[in-house]
Image: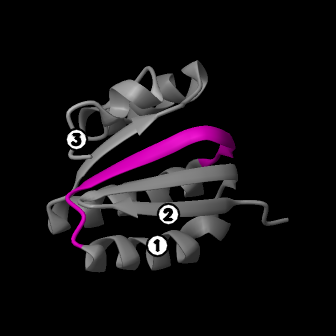
Amino acid sequence: MDDFKVNLQLEKSVARLSMSGDLTHLAEERMATIFEKIQSSGARFLVLDFRRVEYINSAGMSVLITLLTRSQKAGLELRAFGLSPHYQKIFDMVGLLKYIPHFDSEESAFKGLPS
């Protein structure tokens, strides 16, 4: 069952990607389409909101790594917030936190970005 949802909000040079549900291989096409919109918008920052993501499997991690790779090539700075402690630990173990800093709150994730 595909219960993954994603909402994109664009404001000036900041893109906010709010996700909910299970991040699995079923999210791949949707995330690729969303990334095209982000890239064509001219955004320079991408903030990932994980507060409503319930589950991320290995294929979902692969989707995020693809998003990271494409973002780096496009010159986008990534930030994230809302990961559970469990997923923060997994992101740290696989090295994602080196490239996608995780913030403790929504406010801190957006601090210093153009408004």
Q: Residue under circle 3?
A: 113
Please, what is the three-letter code of the amino acid marked with disc 2?
A: Leu
Q: Evaluate if marks 1 and 3 touch, with contact meaning CB atoms under 8 Å apart.
A: no
Secondary structure of the residue carrying numbered label 3: loop
Image-quadrant location for residue 28: bottom right
Measure how far apart labels 1 and 3 are at the Cα level.
21 Å
Secondary structure of the residue carrying numbered label 2: strand
Up-down: is 91 above or below 65?
above
In the image, taking residue 64 as reference, residue 115 lies left or right, namely left
Q: Evaluate if marks 1 and 2 touch, with contact meaning CB atoms under 8 Å apart.
A: yes
Q: Earlier in the sequence, mark 1 or mark 3?
A: 1
The x, y position of residue 102, in whole percent, is: 37, 29
> Does the magenta run of residues contain 45?
yes
Image-quadrant location for residue 40: bottom left
Q: Nearer the viewer, mark 1 or mark 2?
A: 2
Please, what is the three-letter code of the amino acid marked with disc 1?
A: Ile
In the image, taking residue 59 as reference, residue 1 lies left or right, namely right
Please, what is the three-letter code of the amino acid marked with disc 3?
A: Leu
The x, y position of residue 17, in whole percent, is: 48, 55
Q: Residue under circle 1?
A: 34
Chief SS of the magenta region: strand
Pick out the residue farthest to the front: 115
Residue range (magenta): 42-57
> Does the magenta run of residues contain 11?
no
Q: Residue under circle 2?
A: 8
The x, y position of residue 23, in whole percent, is: 63, 54
The x, y position of residue 57, in whole percent, is: 63, 47
At x 46%, y 24%, the residue is 105
Measure how far apart labels 2 and 3 are at the Cα level.
17 Å
Q: Earlier in the sequence, mark 2 or mark 3?
A: 2
Secondary structure of the residue carrying numbered label 1: helix
